[in-house]
Amino acid sequence: MLRVEMHDSSNAFIIRLEGRFTGEGAEHVRTLVTRCHTEMRLVVDLTEVTFVDAVGEEVLSFLKRVEAEFVADTAYIFDVCERLHLPLARKRLSMKKVSGSSYGQEHRAFPNSLRSESSCISQQPSVQRE
């Protein structure tokens, strides 16, 4: 099962992942990120991730290409980040949940090939997959 939470802090847009980052759940995270238009720093918190499969690794590499930074606290996740050359965030960020209607005034610009017309404001901030 994968749980995805989106948070807004004063200096970053944070995606917190919990559980197994695999298959369809990982692809769903890629879709959420491509639909979000924010210029804020993107941080992916992998602290509670217990397993990453090949699809999850591809999505993490994709997130690296859109300039995400990663938070890792366990030896397993540090190993994944090292193997994939994922940049670690400079420090832990305090997080507050994204409100239903807005996640901040700043927006992240993704490369044109990754953009969609939808905004992540219309997405549910928390998703659970089995």
Image: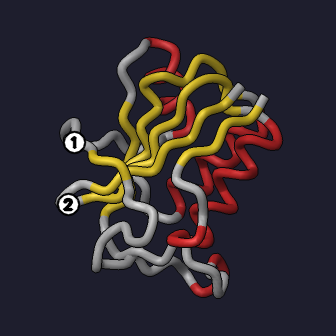
Which image quarter is the N terminus in?
A: top right
- Disc 2 to disc 1, how far (Cα)? 9 Å
Q: Secondary structure at mark 1?
A: loop
Q: Which residue shows up at 39% across the image and 27% down it? A: 72
Estimate the x, y position of residue 124 in percent, counting from the top left: 59, 57
Q: Are marks 2 and 1 in contact (CB under 8 Å)?
A: yes
Looking at the image, residue 52 lies above or below residue 118: above
Q: Which residue is mark 1?
A: 93
- In the image, taking residue 63 as reference, residue 39 lies left or right, namely left
Q: Which residue is mark 2?
A: 11
At label 1, which amino acid type do we have? Leu
At label 2, which amino acid type do we have? Asn
Q: Which residue shows up at 47% across the image and 31% down it? A: 46
For the residue carrying disc 2, how many other residues have a C-alpha within 10 Å: few (<14), some (14-19), or many (20+)?
Answer: few
Q: Which residue shows up at 60% across the image and 49% down it? A: 61
**How many labels, in total?**
2
- In the image, taking residue 19 as reference, residue 8 lies left or right, namely left
- In the image, taking residue 45 as reference, residue 53 lies left or right, namely right
For the residue carrying disc 1, how many other residues have a C-alpha within 10 Å: few (<14), some (14-19), or many (20+)?
Answer: some
Q: Secondary structure at mark 2?
A: loop
Q: Which residue shows up at 75% across the image and 28% down it? A: 53
Q: Of all residues shown, which one is farthest toward the top?
A: 75
Estimate the x, y position of residue 8 in percent, counting from the top left: 31, 56
